[in-house]
């Protein structure tokens, strides 16, 4: 009788031990997912920023690619000199395509959406293709976006593009240097939206159900 009771208690103890291990795994899983969500804040953007700056320094692009973290997210300003020929919207060379490929290979590792903005200086343009800077800046942003989707297979749901012409300058248009700074493409790595947080939370619940089902 004593031996039988001991065996029963042993079985019960093993079951409790297994259940406890599963609960520990579940707790660790939640902690990891919470850390993933938390990493989408300022620290995450700074991590991306560090990687971008390392790439820029390695390739000596310090005068042509700049970045800042603001309320919109991580804003990376790329000089149009690196991307396009004057008055044109297609990516100019293999060099420009390589730059975009290298930068977006970094961004691909994160769930953030990316906004691509085209900007020009205030010198007017009037061609059969581009009646104004509005059209030119929009076409440049669209051209870059199309390259990402068609050539790099970047998720189109994570991309937005728009053009602002000369109306969002970052320097004075009174000097050649200022105008050069204003002719740019801004690539903005956005902070995660509430919807994206909800999606992460949904995945957490789904994975939790899978783990809990192992205990039943």
Image: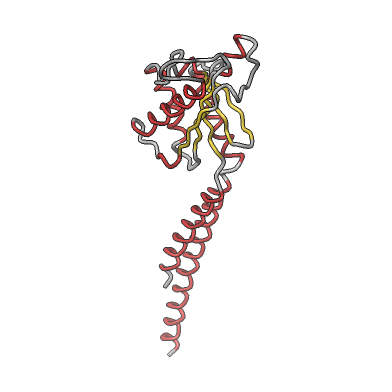
| Quadrant in the picture for the C terminus | bottom left
* Residue 79 pos. (x, y %): 52, 18
**Residue toward you, 168 or 28:** 168
**Residue toward you, 42 or 5:** 42
* Residue 137 pos. (x, y %): 49, 24
Q: Is residue 148 above or below residue 125?
A: below
| Quadrant in the picture for the N terminus | bottom left
* Residue 212 pos. (x, y %): 45, 67
Image quadrant assignment for residue 147: top left
**Residue toward you, 92 or 67:** 92
The residue positioned farthest toward the top in the image shown = 176
- Image point (56%, 29%), residue name: 50
* Residue 49 pos. (x, y %): 56, 31
Q: How many marks?
A: 0
Q: Is residue 102 above or below residue 39?
A: above
- Image point (53%, 21%), residue name: 184
The residue positioned farthest toward the bottom in the image shown = 1
**Residue toward you, 166 or 208:** 166
Task: State the scheme by which the image is colored.
Answer: secondary structure
- Image point (49%, 36%), residue name: 114
Q: Is 186 on the left or on the right of 156, as rendered?
A: right
């Amino acid at each position: 009788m004593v031996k039988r009771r001991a065996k029963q208690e042993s079985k019960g103890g093993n079951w409790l031990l297994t259940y406890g291990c599963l609960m520990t795994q579940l707790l660790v899983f939640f902690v990891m997912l919470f850390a993933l969500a938390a990493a989408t804040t300022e620290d995450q953007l700074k991590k991306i920023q560090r990687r971008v700056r390392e790439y820029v320094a390695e390739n000596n692009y310090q005068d042509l690619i700049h970045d800042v973290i603001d309320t919109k997210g991580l804003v990376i300003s790329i000089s149009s000199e690196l991307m396009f020929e004057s008055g044109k919207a297609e990516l100019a060379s293999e060099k420009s395509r390589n730059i975009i490929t290298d930068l977006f290979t970094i961004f691909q590792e994160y769930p953030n959406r990316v906004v691509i903005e085209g900007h020009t200086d205030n010198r007017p343009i009037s061609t059969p293709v581009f009646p104004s800077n509005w059209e030119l800046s929009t076409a440049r942003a669209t051209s870059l976006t199309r390259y990402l989707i068609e050539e790099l297979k970047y998720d189109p749901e994570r991309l937005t593009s728009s053009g602002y012409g000369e109306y969002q300058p970052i320097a004075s248009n009174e000097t050649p240097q200022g105008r050069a700074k204003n002719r740019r493409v801004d690539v903005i790595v956005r902070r995660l939206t509430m919807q994206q947080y909800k999606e992460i939370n949904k995945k957490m619940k789904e994975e939790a159900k899978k783990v809990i089902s192992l205990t039943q």
